[in-house]
Image (cartoon, helix red, strand yellow):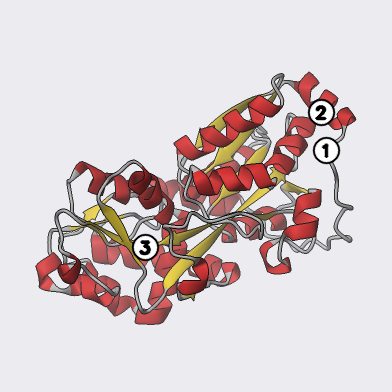
Amino acid sequence: MSNTKVAAGALLAALAWSQVAWAAPPEPYNVTDELVAAATKEGSVVYYTSTDVQVAEKLGSAFEAHYPGIKVQVERAGSERVFQRIGQEYSSGIHNADVIETSDASHFLTFKDQNWLTPAVPEDVAKMWPEKDRDPDGLYAAFRATLTVIAYRTDLVKEEDAPKTWTDLLDPKYKDKLVKSHPGYSGNVMTATYALSQLLGWDYFEKLGKQGVMQVQSSTEPPKVLAQGERPIQADGNEYNVFILQDKGLPIKAVYPAEGTSIAYGNAAILAYAPHPNAAKLFYSFMFSQEAQQLNDDFGGLRSVRPDVKEKSNRTPLSQIKLLESDPANVRDAIEEIKQKYEEYFGT
C-alpha cells in the first residue's frame, strides 16, 4: 500500500483547508431547449465515478440515447482513487472532469471546503430529495445509496451454516473461506469499517485479520470472487453487485447482520472548472431523473432516495433492514486511523 500512502499524503499536503461562507443555494433548474443546444455544441461530458463500470456505462448509454449529440466518457475507479485523482488534478491546475460521484460522502466535504464544486440544483432534487440527502448550499446530492453486506454461495454453504452476524465471521470454521474489500480503495468499505469499528471495536478487525481473508480492492470485487468460486463467503462487499449476479442466475445470497448494515450515500456534483459546463449540467440533471434512478435500481441493483423508484419484489426493502448511518465528518476525521489499523491487522 506504499503508493497509496504516498498519493494520499500528497493529496493531504496539497489541500489547504478553508471555511467557505456560501450564499443561499441557487434556484432549481429545468432542462430547456437552450441548455440542450449548448450541451450538444460542447459534444461530450466526462464522468468520474466509483460506481461499477457496467452500471456507470449503462447510465451513460441511456443519456446518449436521449441526447444523441453528446458522448459520455466514463472514468471509473475506487472512491479513494477518484478522490486522490481530483485532488492531484485540481492542485495542479488540471481540469479534465465535468461530473464526479463517489460512495464516500466525506469526500464532498473536502471538495466543498476547497471550493471545487459548482452550485447546481436539478428540479427533481429540489422537489423529491430529503434534506438530509442533499447539500444545503446546493453543491451535491445523493445519487445512490449502497449497503455493505455479508454474502455467500448457496451451493457451497448451507443456509444453517452461513454467517448471520458480523461476529459470526470470526468462527474458526470460516478461516480461509472469506474475501473482503479494502477501505483504502473503496468508499463503501471505508464507511462500513468506520461504522463497525464504532459498533464492535477494533478488536473485531484484529480477530478478523487472523481468518486468512482474501483481500481485494473495490467493494465490487467480493461478489465477483464468489461468482468465480474462489471463496464461498464475502466478509464485506457491496449489495448491488450481489443483486446483479443474482439477476444473472448465480446462487449468491446477501446477509443483513443483526448488528446492523452500513449504508453509504454516493453523492454527485458538477465540478467548479468543468470543461463542458452545459453538458455537465444536463447530465447532472439526468442522473436524478426517474428514468436514471429506476435504471440504477433495475439494472444496477442500487438503492435510491427518490421516493417514486420501485424496488424489485425479490429484494429486501430498506425498511426491513437495520441500517448503520455514519456522519461523513466523523468518517473523514477517522480515515488515517482506519488505514493505519487496517494495515496493522490485515498486512495490506
**Element marked by disc 2:** helix
Q: Position of residue 295 (x, y in %)?
A: 56, 43
Q: Earlier in the sequence, mark 3 or mark 2?
A: 2
Report the Cα–Cα distance between label 3 and label 2. 40 Å
Q: Disc 2 marks which amino acid?
A: Val
Does residue 84 appear in the picture of this structure?
no
State whether residue 5 is above or below residue 286.
Answer: below
Q: Earlier in the sequence, mark 1 or mark 2?
A: 1
**According to the image, label 2 marks what residue?**
36
Q: Are marks 3 and 2 in contact (CB under 8 Å)?
A: no
- Location of the C terminus (image quadrant): bottom left
Report the Cα–Cα distance between label 3 and label 1. 37 Å
Q: Which residue is located at x 12 percent, y 59 percent?
A: 176
**According to the image, label 1 marks what residue?**
31
Q: Disc 3 marks which amino acid?
A: Val
| Apparent side of residue 160 relative to residue 81 in the rendered image (left or right) | left
Residue neighbourhood size for the residue with mark 1, other residues' Cα within 10 Å, grouped as few (<14), some (14–19), many (≥20): some
**Element marked by disc 1:** loop
Q: Nearer the viewer, residue 2 or 40?
A: 40
Q: Disc 1 marks which amino acid?
A: Val
Q: Position of residue 161 (x, y in %)?
A: 15, 69
Q: Position of residue 318 (x, y in %)?
A: 50, 67
